[in-house]
Image (cartoon, rainbow, N blue to C red):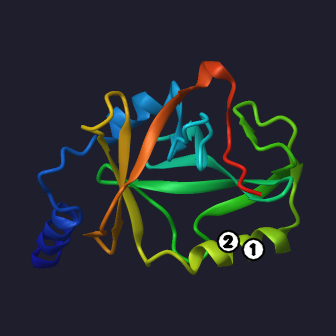
Amino acid sequence: MRRALFCLFALFCAFPVSAQDFLTQAEIEDILRENAFCYVLQADGTCTWAEYYPVLEETRLELHVATVIGPGETVVLRQEAAWIQDAMCIRDGDLGVLDGQMTANPWLSFDLSGLTPMEAATVEGIVAQIAATLNPKTCFRFARDPARPGGLVQITFSDSVQLEGSDAITLAPLSIGGVQLLNVF
């Protein structure tokens, strides 16, 4: 009984309440049913990276993360994440990456057309590079951005501790078909 109470207490305290008004899983899912996430929108309308969420389930979700990694090289990783107390959490190690695809076009099409499958070794190399930049037990919470009406911010947690800073998210309606990605190459 004491162990069960401790587990409940640990789950309750896993994501501390702060002055930030975090959105619930249901609120985020409502947003994701109609929008993709465009991170760090540039003045020219491009996204630094984008995420499209075609699978939303009670305890898991599946997303496609797209970014330009080189001249004519746009990577789209299919990733699995878990919902834990209104937070979107990724696995340590492989980051929940299921597979990867590539295109020469700096564009994430929401119908995922024009993509070529990547070899497993290439995907593993990209995942290793990304994993080296993340802290263990990484989870994300989302809140409305008070500085940008209609925008969101992503707040990162590592082992239940909120990290400094946040990432600005602009909602990209799925009805537009896709988003242009920043190409600095």
**Secondary structure type for disc 1:** helix
Name of the residue lying farthest toward the front? 43
Q: Quadrant of residue 136?
A: bottom left
Mark 2 and mark 1: span between their CA atoms?
Answer: 5 Å
- Seen in the image, is 178 located left or right of residue 139? right
Residue appearing at x 38%, y 57% in the figure: 140
Which residue type does callout 1 highlight?
Glu
Residue carrying label 2:
127
Q: Position of residue 73 (x, y in %)?
A: 83, 56
Front in this rendered view, residue 48 or 52 = 48
Q: Is residue 58 visible?
A: no
In the displayed structure, would residue 139 be above or below residue 104? below
Q: Nearer the viewer, residue 18 or 182?
A: 182
The answer to whether residue 143 shows anywhere in this view is yes
Q: Quadrant of residue 21?
A: top left
Label 1: which residue?
124
Name which residue type carries label 2: Val
Identity of the residue furthest to the top in this view: 175
